[in-house]
Image (tube, rainbow, N blue to C red):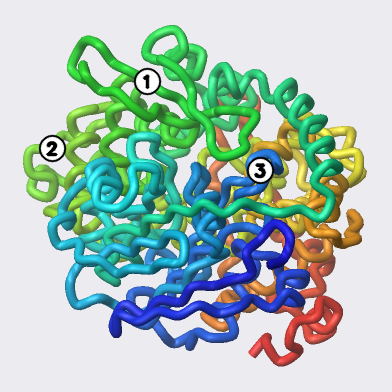
């Protein structure tokens, strides 16, 4: 057995009900890591690009990172990979919690699922045992009840990844939820619909094996030292969660307001912050495996229309999406919408973005009461928002139009509604405005899974965070476009290794740079990596995922922003009047990447990275 990881891959064919285990080539692990890296390599090598996302033989790959389940800080992540039902291109939805650690404890690194079961099933993976079990009695249950039911039938300590009604009904904004009521979401790209298309209700894992390390004492000493720094640097996130900086976000002009139309919301922002949550409904926090931060919010609402609501509280993206994006400043209602999405298995970013799209369509007269039934979709109408979430999850009425996201809804609705569908390559934008942080314009445009901040995270540096071992100490002017191509290139390569290693990117915000990542890899596995090796493998993985997308026709024509981001400046606030110069940044970025003017990796670049030189076709 190799150090840190198991070296085994489980393959399951639901159409035949058969499974087998294969060894993972250690040389490939050094080239592609695990997580989204090896998953992308497997997908590229094995999957016919003509195959649609919801084709029964389209694969779903769940892959723990190289360090998942170890003692390394935040080694909790698993990637759910495949062709996105929402965007039609490469997708890797990552999630923390304890699922990845339990998969590794069961002595597997990943699961490749193909085929479609004739009736609903769930997969039960434990020490030396794999079972495909009937799940018709679970079909129709929400994710909380599903997790509880599966644990009752398997092991009380099993970790369960499941879908709700949204995934069953193939809503393309459906998520996969892990942890039951301690909800963590593999939210982006509609992977819940991919599971639903396979009649796969859940995957439960439980194991008892432990990991061995090349230098246990050295790794433990390094981890203890790093945890102290991470804890100190992340104190605000521990106290107030991911939404502790919302007032600052509003002040710098990055808050997404009224479907990204407004520039300021000073009166509403203080009502929905992490600080406000702490003062009112917060009861505690929860954390993922090996996490020194503990950003998860536990809440309880004791009175009012949502009295009795108890469990996982909303994170930053959810609060912004169901808050200022829809002009709603009622924190308790946002918590209720978060709970509803978690139960249904809905991505809160894409769902809230779609709700805001519908509200603007209502305002413009493109949707009427005949379309919405009894729902009033006026801005800030909580009852209308809650009702629309229900319809989207069930694909009923107007929800059938919206369940496939804003791009598909705009294509069906027509009448220039694409002008206010805020998405890139079909994926709704997360809530960090590229007009306030111009590097994010290029990051969104070129991210491999579409509108995604996690592939870049450069706005952290524009806020003032430092990475000395990458040469990023003095933050640049966040409102200019000059110099941002180099920064995006560097940070995409850096951030590209986190999914492959199975680590949460919040530790990067807490001061972890590529040198420390290299140290952990070396101590855990006995390798001899440098900072250059870390960034090089990040570049290899980014290009590999671009190659997958090139086979689906992705090129420069798709590396675009929605009209609202490149043509309409914010009308007020500290980012008033600013627009990113995407065309210039793209030209510089393609040159740095070694891509053609059309955004295609060149044969010379592929050879340099050790990728197949003919893979660009």
Please indicate whether residue 242 sits to the left or right of residue 33 in the image: left
Crowd around label 3: few <14 · some 14–19 · many ≥20 (10 Å) = some
> What SS does tag 1 mark?
strand
What residue would you read off at disc 3? 505
Q: Is residue 336 visible?
A: yes
Crowd around label 1: few <14 · some 14–19 · many ≥20 (10 Å) = many
Q: Residue at x 54, y 37 (%)?
A: 288
Crowd around label 2: few <14 · some 14–19 · many ≥20 (10 Å) = some
Viewer-nearest residue: 581 or 376: 376
Q: Residue at x 45, y 25 (%)?
A: 297
Q: CA distance from mark 2 to mark 1?
A: 28 Å
Q: Residue at x 58, y 46 (%)?
A: 76
In the rendered image, the vertical position of residue 328 relative to residue 616, given as above or below: above
Please indicate whether residue 515 sits to the left or right of residue 124 in the image: right
Q: Residue 22: percent from the left, percent from the top?
A: 55, 79
Q: Which mark is residue 299?
A: 1
What residue would you read off at disc 2? 375
Q: CA distance from mark 1 to mark 3?
A: 24 Å
Rendering quarter of residue 202: bottom left
Q: Residue 97: percent from the left, percent from the top?
A: 49, 42
Q: CA distance from mark 2 to mark 3?
A: 39 Å
Viewer-nearest residue: 431 or 174: 174
Of discs 2 and 1, which sits in the foreground?
Answer: 1
Q: Earlier in the sequence, mark 1 or mark 3?
A: 1
Q: Residue 401: percent from the left, percent from the top?
A: 22, 58
In the rendered image, the vertical position of residue 393 relative to residue 14, given as above or below: above
Q: Residue 3: percent from the left, percent from the top?
A: 73, 60
> What SS does tag 2 mark?
loop
Viewer-nearest residue: 476 or 42: 42
């Amino acid at each position: 057995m190799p150090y840190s990881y198991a070296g085994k891959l489980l393959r399951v064919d639901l159409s035949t009900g058969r499974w087998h285990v294969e060894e993972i080539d250690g040389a490939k692990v050094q080239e592609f890591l695990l997580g989204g890296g090896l998953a992308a390599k497997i997908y590229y090598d094995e999957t016919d690009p003509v195959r649609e996302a919801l084709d029964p033989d389209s694969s779903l790959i769940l892959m723990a990172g190289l360090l998942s389940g170890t003692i390394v800080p935040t080694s909790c992540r698993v990637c759910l990979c495949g062709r996105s039902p929402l965007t039609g291109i490469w997708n890797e939805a990552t999630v923390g919690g304890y699922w990845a650690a339990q998969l590794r404890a069961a002595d597997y690194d990943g699961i490749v699922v193909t085929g479609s079961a004739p009736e609903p099933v769930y997969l039960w993976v434990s020490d030396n045992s794999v079972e495909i079990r009937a799940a018709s009695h679970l079909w129709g249950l929400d994710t909380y009840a599903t997790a509880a039911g599966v644990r009752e039938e398997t092991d009380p300590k099993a970790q369960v990844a499941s879908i709700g009604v949204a995934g069953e009904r193939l809503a393309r904004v459906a998520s996969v939820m892990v942890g039951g009521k301690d909800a963590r979401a593999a939210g982006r790209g509609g992977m819940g619909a991919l599971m639903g298309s396979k009649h796969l209700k859940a995957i439960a894992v439980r194991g008892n094996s432990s990991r061995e390390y090349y230098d246990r004492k050295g790794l433990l000493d390094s981890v203890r030292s790093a945890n102290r720094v991470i804890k100190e640097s992340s104190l605000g996130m521990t106290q107030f969660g991911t939404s502790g900086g919302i007032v600052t976000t509003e002040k710098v002009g990055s808050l997404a307001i009224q479907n990204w139309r407004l520039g300021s919301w000073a009166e509403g922002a203080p009502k929905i912050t992490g600080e406000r949550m702490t003062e009112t409904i917060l009861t505690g926090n929860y954390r993922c495996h090996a996490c020194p931060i503990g950003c998860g919010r536990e809440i309880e609402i004791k009175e009012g229309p949502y009295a009795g609501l108890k469990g996982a509280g909303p994170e930053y993206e959810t609060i912004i999406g169901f808050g200022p994006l829809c002009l709603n400043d009622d924190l308790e209602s946002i918590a209720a919408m978060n709970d509803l999405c978690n139960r249904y298995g809905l991505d809160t970013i894409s769902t809230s973005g779609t709700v805001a799209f519908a509200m603007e369509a209502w305002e413009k007269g493109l949707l009427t009461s005949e379309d919405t039934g009894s729902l009033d979709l006026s801005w800030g109408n909580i009852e209308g928002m809650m009702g629309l979430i229900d319809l989207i999850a069930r694909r009923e009425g107007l929800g059938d139009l919206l369940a496939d996201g804003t791009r598909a809804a705009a294509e069906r609705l027509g009448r220039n509604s694409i002008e206010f569908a805020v998405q890139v390559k079909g994926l709704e934008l997360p809530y960090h405005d590229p007009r306030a942080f111009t590097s994010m314009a290029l990051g969104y445009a070129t991210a491999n899974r579409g509108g995604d901040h996690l592939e870049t995270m450069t706005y952290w540096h524009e806020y003032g965070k430092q990475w000395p071992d990458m040469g990023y100490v003095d933050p640049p002017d966040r409102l200019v476009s000059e110099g941002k191509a180099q920064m995006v290139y560097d940070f995409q390569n850096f951030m590209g290794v986190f999914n492959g290693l199975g680590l949460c990117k919040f530790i990067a915000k807490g001061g972890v740079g590529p040198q420390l990542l290299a140290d952990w890899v070396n101590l855990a596995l006995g390798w001899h990596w440098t900072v250059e090796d870390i960034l090089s493998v990040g570049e290899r993985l980014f290009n590999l995922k671009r190659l997958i997308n090139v086979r689906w026709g992705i090129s420069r024509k798709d590396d675009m922003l929605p009209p609202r981001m490149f043509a309409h400046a914010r009308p007020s606030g500290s980012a008033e009047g600013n627009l990113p110069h995407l065309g210039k940044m793209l030209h510089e970025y393609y040159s740095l990447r070694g891509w053609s003017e059309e955004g295609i990796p060149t044969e010379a670049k592929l050879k340099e990275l050790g990728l197949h030189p003919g893979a660009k076709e």
